[in-house]
């Protein structure tokens, strides 16, 4: 049977159609059309929505709301999203960035999903047609999720408070050995007052480095100050093994790269 | 099987076709319309050989469903030369010996075209970034990078 | 953290043509009524430019500009046998067949010209521009255009030729291995400079200086294409490529260009190519096959440079950051 | 690129009209305008798409194959199994008398590697072929598999390929191709140092941007035109003729414009089954590898293991070299026996060594059959040899480049396979590299020449 695409003007209607078995949501196509091309016959129908709110970027009073259909390229070039542009530019090559969406990135399995790593460090809220939830909860339950993601919301960090690093073998466009995002604030005495660190490829989906976060609070960003955080970076991780790198390698170099990100 | 109508502009001329649901733009262009300049190198979005320009943006036709392109302005490498006169990029690829097997070439040229449309005087870094989604197995990339830089210089001299 | 620098060298040779010979290629050449030349083959152009090179070889041999030659290849209904494009054999084997065919056609062409000019064919030469001249008396000449017209419409001659090239097959002696694997060898020496990050095992190739001896650069720009691309592939082979990253374990084989690693346009080393020409005795205009060997010397040169940089030997390909890091940790533990 | 014309100027004829000229490529205008026609750019009305049902196991007996559900699937036109292939067991090099025939076009009773072709489905669309392929039921009894060459060569290892009867290719010289030159043991006995080292590679992929494939059109007169990206037209035609038991006169192959090969398109894999499909359906057939198939199903460069034992003198002369090479052919021969033979001819590298002992083995394991790739039989050997050269130089405290000059072959030197060296140029390459890389060597090395000694 041919792959049928249904287009709806509202998210609600699209969500209703998505309940049918074998139906998947079509965002940028980088995951689902690829799967169909590769012979994944479990997908028999595609649903999409042209609701304009899905493609909107709204910045208001330091808070950002990014529609789920917004592409990585749109984020990378948005004048008020400069702080997180690096994370958007880390996804794919130019053509992929013109297609890949924020919503899709939330579902991308490791080693993909670098932008979702950034969103996790930003403590984003994920809006779906069924309601809102913290990104951590969303990521944990994403495999069973049937509700269309409509947007993500987060407080815009100051550029100097948001750090992002993607390590890849191939430059400038390669998939992740690992990625690290850190949202970090320092007190007047330069000690770390708040921090969220998210890791890509350290599990099958983005995860927080809570051990490292805890160790950083109150410390100074120098070699000695971050030592405890680097030692704790691997806590709770179970890195993936894939053609890019083994779990062993990812675990070994995580503290190295985290250290460079924190000191850089 | 139910067919879906699609209508768009390809290199300036109107096209209307009926395609099966789920047909990719790559398939529609090559097998329905007969523009075989976009190549199917992977159908995974990982090689860039199928790159086309849709409404001014570089896109992968293998991951784009034809039925989502209604009303779009689509450009491919086969439409780049005007009245038999090669586009400066095409000329630069020839002069730089930047093609070997030629299979990646149309996609490379599309990627480079979008770059020069937005960034007429690109740095080497810009060119590297612009070509980064396109795989070439023959050339080692350097001649292609040089061709794009040369085309950019030729363009800016013409504009001056 | 330390970025450590090292350099390594490797020198190699490589046989031209199918090992042990026995690999035929044939060619047919004929002229059209107006003195254009058609080369008929069944050889395959993989992108290396076989068609262009055969056109240049035919043009040189006949004595016309290359744009007067058309290559009709790889249709088994019309093209005579070619064993195939592999083993650095295309230029060498097909080129020799084209030369032989073109020489035969040229002889007919000169005979017709001789009749028109009322001289001996052996007194004629071509100027490479499409004219046939009397040696020592260049004012006495005829264009190949007119010669072809005469051959077709007046003299009833076919300006055509058959070419075949076959190196007799060698059979290795069972106990000693005495054999003749090839008739000519290309050579190379490569020096590579790298930087190795001793905390991550990541390697950056800074410079690659390649010297290749390839017999004869029939078209220098096309030789350069192949050598530059080959040098890139050698670096790729050294540091990136594998379909079985955990060999001999079969798991985690890459299935796309994201997982199958090759250097991207942002990973390019500064690459220098120097070509020497020692014409081979049996190559077409002295050519050897450069297509394969140009991707070989970079691999050991990189391995040697990595050792020079960080003092560990990686004897397993590819030389991944993981292998380097494991070796560095083992070195530190001892 | 720089041409250094000063070397060998006495042997080169310059002043030619077309040779040595950087003429523009006649095919490039087609490339840059997207007009160059590759095989897959031909699309025929009514064309069927062929998809392969492949083995999910590394080694298994096939108890049964049930295609009944798949045959009923909408859009399916024909399903092919081993019994449909006239001469199902073949080997490519049989054309040059290198047997035995050891590979099935479609698996018959057994699969020997994960990904092996079992059933071919021909349908109106790719999607219909994929859906039907999922409905083919194959009942497998999984057998023990062997992936490691050394394990495969041990007694009692699972037998990979019954057509060979043992897990290595049997040459006329026995279990390996041999080269014996001088007295290697005597050489080791006289050496100041002995160094034995082992080198290993894993398989790599040609990764051309255009995947392997063909499009077949029945001409309506019992002839079939096959548009293909094979690297060898008649090799493919003649093997197809054998496999399909069809006179070669019925086959017409058109190709010659290929989107990259690198050795990956010299196997005869897609054409015979596609032509069979066209013959049995009377319809055009397209069989094009997906990228995933190109990466994991098409033949890679073989993994190799190379063990080198050298005897070297303190003055830099290598006096004995023993090389044992193992080529991992995977489950079937394809071109691997030739590759291992080519390795035997290549060792001990471009060096003149008085005592040489070479053994090269072609070993079968339960992995994707390997085959030719750019540098076939030599690339991994060169890696091993040249790393070994570096180690030897450092062992005796000599500059690695100077060490190579001492041992470099020159015109007239007898190689291990007993041919005299002709046309050597290694020394000149190293001299130029010394200059280009600012890696100085002693003046006596810069004064050396490859020309026949005394001439």
Image (cartoon, grey):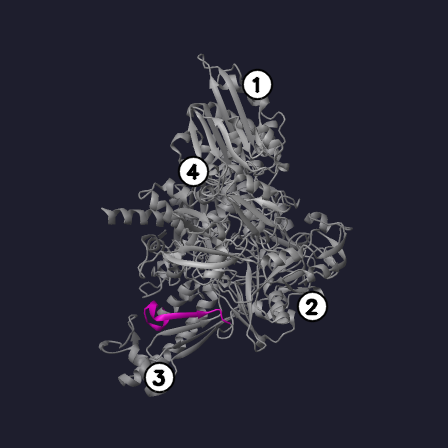
Q: Nearer the viewer, mark 2 or mark 3?
A: 2
SS state under label 4 = helix
| Quarter of image, res D98 | bottom right
Marks 2/3 in contact by CB < 8 Å: the verdict is no
The residues tagged by marks 4 and 1 sit, at their Cα atoms, a distance apart of 34 Å
> Horizontally, is A176 left or right of A157 in the view?
right
State whether residue A24 appears in this view: yes
- The spot of residue D298 in percent (x, y) is 59, 55
Please state the chain letter of the residue tagged with numbered disc 3 in the rendered image. C
What's the mark number on residue A74?
4
Give a yes or no on whether discs 1 and 3 share a subunit. no
Q: Nearer the viewer, mark 4 or mark 1?
A: 4
Q: Nearer the viewer, mark 4 or mark 2?
A: 4
State whether residue C277 appears in this view: no
What's the mark number on residue C152?
3
Residue D227 vs residue D331, the one in the foreground:
D227
Tell me the residue at 59%/49% (across/down).
A45
**Above or below — where is A18 with respect to B12?**
above
Marks 4/2 in contact by CB < 8 Å: the verdict is no
Residue D40 vs residue A149, the one in the foreground:
A149
> Horizontally, is C216 left or right of D313 in the view?
left
Q: Tag count in the figure?
A: 4
Badge 1: how crowded within 10 Å, few (<14), some, or many (20+)? Answer: some
Marks 1/3 in contact by CB < 8 Å: the verdict is no
Residue span colored magenta: C60-75
The residues tagged by marks 4 and 3 sit, at their Cα atoms, a distance apart of 67 Å
- The spot of residue B120 in percent (x, y) is 31, 44
Per the image, the residue denoted by label 2 is D84
> Horizontally, is B112 left or right of A182 in the view?
left
Give a yes or no on whether discs 2 and 1 share a subunit. no
């Amino acid at each position: 049977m041919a792959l049928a695409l249904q287009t709806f003007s509202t998210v609600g209607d699209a969500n209703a159609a998505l309940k049918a078995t074998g139906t998947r949501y079509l965002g940028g196509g980088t995951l689902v059309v690829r799967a169909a091309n590769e012979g994944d016959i479990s997908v028999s129908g595609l649903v999409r929505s042209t609701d304009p709110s899905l493609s909107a970027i709204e910045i208001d009073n330091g808070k950002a709301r990014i529609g789920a259909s917004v592409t990585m390229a749109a984020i990378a070039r948005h004048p008020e999203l400069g702080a997180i542009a690096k994370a958007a530019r880390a996804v794919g090559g130019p053509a992929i960035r013109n297609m890949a969406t924020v919503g899709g990135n939330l579902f991308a399995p490791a080693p993909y999903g670098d932008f979702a790593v950034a969103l996790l460090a930003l403590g984003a809220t994920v809006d779906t047609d069924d309601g809102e939830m913290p990104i951590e909860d969303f990521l944990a339950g994403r495999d069973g999720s049937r509700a269309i993601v409509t947007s993500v919301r987060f407080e815009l960090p100051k550029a100097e408070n948001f750090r992002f690093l993607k390590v890849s073998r191939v430059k400038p466009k390669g998939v992740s050995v690992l990625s690290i995002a850190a949202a970090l604030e320092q007190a007047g005495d330069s000690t770390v007052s708040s921090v969220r660190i998210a890791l890509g490829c350290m599990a099958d989906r983005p995860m927080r480095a809570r051990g490292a976060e805890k160790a950083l609070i109150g410390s100074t960003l120098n070699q000695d100050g971050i030592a405890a955080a680097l030692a704790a970076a691997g806590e709770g991780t179970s890195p993936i093994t894939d053609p890019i790198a083994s779990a062993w390698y990812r675990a070994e170099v995580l503290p190295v790269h985290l250290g460079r990100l924190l000191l850089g | 099987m139910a067919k879906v109508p699609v209508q768009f502009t390809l290199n300036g001329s109107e096209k209307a076709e009926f395609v099966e649901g789920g047909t990719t733009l790559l398939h529609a262009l090559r097998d329905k319309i007969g523009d075989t300049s976009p190549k199917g190198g992977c159908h995974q979005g990982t090689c860039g050989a199928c790159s086309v320009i849709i409404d001014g943006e570089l896109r992968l036709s293998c991951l784009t469903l034809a039925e989502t392109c209604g009303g779009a302005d689509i450009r491919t490498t086969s439409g780049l030369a005007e009245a038999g006169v090669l586009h400066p990029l095409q000329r630069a690829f020839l002069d730089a010996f930047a093609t070997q097997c030629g299979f990646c070439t149309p996609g490379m040229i599309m990627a480079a075209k979008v770059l020069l449309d937005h960034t007429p005087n690109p740095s080497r870094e810009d060119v590297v970034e612009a070509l980064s989604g396109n795989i070439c197995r023959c050339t080692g990339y350097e001649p292609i990078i040089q061709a794009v830089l040369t085309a950019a210089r030729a363009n800016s001299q013409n504009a001056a | 953290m330390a970025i450590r620098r090292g350099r390594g060298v490797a020198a190699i040779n490589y046989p031209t043509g199918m090992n042990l010979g026995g690999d035929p290629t044939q060619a047919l050449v004929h002229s059209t009524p107006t003195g254009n030349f058609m080369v008929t083959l069944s050889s395959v152009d993989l992108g290396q430019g076989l068609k262009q090179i055969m056109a240049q070889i035919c043009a040189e041999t006949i004595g016309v500009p290359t744009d007067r030659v058309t290559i009709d290849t790889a249709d088994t209904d019309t093209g005579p046998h070619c064993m195939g494009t592999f083993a650095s054999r295309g230029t060498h084997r097909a080129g020799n067949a084209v030369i032989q065919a073109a020489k035969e056609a040229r002889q007919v062409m000169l005979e017709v010209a001789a009749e028109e000019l009322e001289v001996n064919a052996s007194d004629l030469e071509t100027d490479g521009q499409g004219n046939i001249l009397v040696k020592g008396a260049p004012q006495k000449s005829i264009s190949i255009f007119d010669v072809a017209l005469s051959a077709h419409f007046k003299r009833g001659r076919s300006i055509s030729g058959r070419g075949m090239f076959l190196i007799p097959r060698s059979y290795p002696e069972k106990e000693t291995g005495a054999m003749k694997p090839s008739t000519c060898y290309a050579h190379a020496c490569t020096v590579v400079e790298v930087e190795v990050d001793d905390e991550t095992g990541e390697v950056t190739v800074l410079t690659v200086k390649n010297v290749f001896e390839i017999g004869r650069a029939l078209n220098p720009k096309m030789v350069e294409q192949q050598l530059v691309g080959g040098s890139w592939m050698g670096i790729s082979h050294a540091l990136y490529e594998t379909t079985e990253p955990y060999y001999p374990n079969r798991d985690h084989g890459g299935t796309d260009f994201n997982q199958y690693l090759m250097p991207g346009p942002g990973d390019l080393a500064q690459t220098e190519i120097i070509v020497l020409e020692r014409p081979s005795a049996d190559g077409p205009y002295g050519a050897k096959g450069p297509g394969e060997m140009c991707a070989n010397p970079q691999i050991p040169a990189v391995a040697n440079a990595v050792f020079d940089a960080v003092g560990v030997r990686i004897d397993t390909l590819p030389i991944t950051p993981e292998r380097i890091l494991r070796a560095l940790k083992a070195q530190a533990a001892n | 690129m720089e041409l250094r014309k000063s070397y060998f100027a006495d042997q080169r004829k310059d002043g030619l009209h077309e040779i040595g000229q950087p003429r523009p490529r006649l095919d490039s205008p087609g490339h840059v305008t997207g007009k160059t026609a590759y095989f897959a750019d031909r699309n025929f009305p009514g064309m069927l798409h062929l998809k392969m049902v492949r083995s999910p196991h590394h080694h298994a007996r096939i108890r049964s194959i049930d295609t009944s559900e798949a045959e009923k699937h909408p859009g399916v036109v024909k399903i092919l199994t081993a019994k449909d292939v006239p001469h199902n067991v073949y080997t490519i090099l049989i054309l040059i008398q290198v047997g035995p025939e050891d590979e099935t076009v479609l698996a018959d009773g057994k699969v020997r590697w994960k990904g092996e072709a079992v059933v071919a489905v021909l349908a109106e669309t790719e999607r219909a072929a994929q859906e039907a392929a999922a409905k083919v039921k194959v009942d497998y009894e999984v057998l023990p598999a062997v992936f490691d060459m050394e394990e495969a060569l041990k007694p009692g290892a699972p037998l990979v390929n019954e057509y060979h009867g043992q897990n290595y290719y049997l040459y006329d010289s026995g279990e390996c191709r041999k080269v014996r030159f001088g007295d290697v043991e005597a050489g080791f006995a006289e050496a100041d140092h002995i160094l034995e080292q082992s080198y290993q590679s894993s398989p790599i992929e040609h990764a051309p941007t255009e995947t392997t494939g063909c499009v077949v059109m029945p001409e309506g007169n019992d002839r079939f035109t096959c548009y293909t990206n094979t690297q060898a037209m008649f090799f493919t035609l003649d093997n197809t003729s054998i496999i399909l038991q069809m006179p070669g006169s019925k086959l017409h192959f058109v190709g010659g414009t290929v989107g990259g090969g690198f050795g990956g398109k010299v196997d005869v894999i897609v054409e015979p089954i596609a032509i069979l499909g066209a013959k049995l359906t009377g319809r055009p057939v397209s069989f094009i590898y997906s990228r995933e198939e190109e990466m994991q199903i098409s033949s890679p460069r073989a993994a190799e293991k190379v063990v080198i034992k050298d005897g070297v003198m303190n003055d830099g002369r290598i006096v004995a070299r023993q090389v044992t090479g193992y080529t991992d052919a995977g489950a079937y021969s394809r071109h691997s026996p030739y590759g291992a033979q080519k390795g035997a001819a290549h060792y001990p590298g471009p060096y003149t060594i008085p005592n040489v002992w070479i053994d090269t083995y072609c070993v079968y394991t339960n992995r994707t059959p390997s085959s030719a790739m750019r540098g076939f039989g030599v690339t991994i050997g060169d890696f091993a040899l040249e790393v070994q050269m570096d180690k030897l130089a450092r062992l005796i405290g000599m500059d690695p480049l100077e060490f190579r000059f001492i041992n470099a072959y020159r015109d007239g030197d007898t190689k291990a396979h007993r041919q005299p060296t002709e046309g050597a140029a290694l020394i000149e390459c190293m001299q130029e590299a010394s200059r280009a890389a600012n890696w100085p060597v002693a003046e006596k090395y810069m004064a050396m020449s490859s020309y026949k000694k005394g001439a």
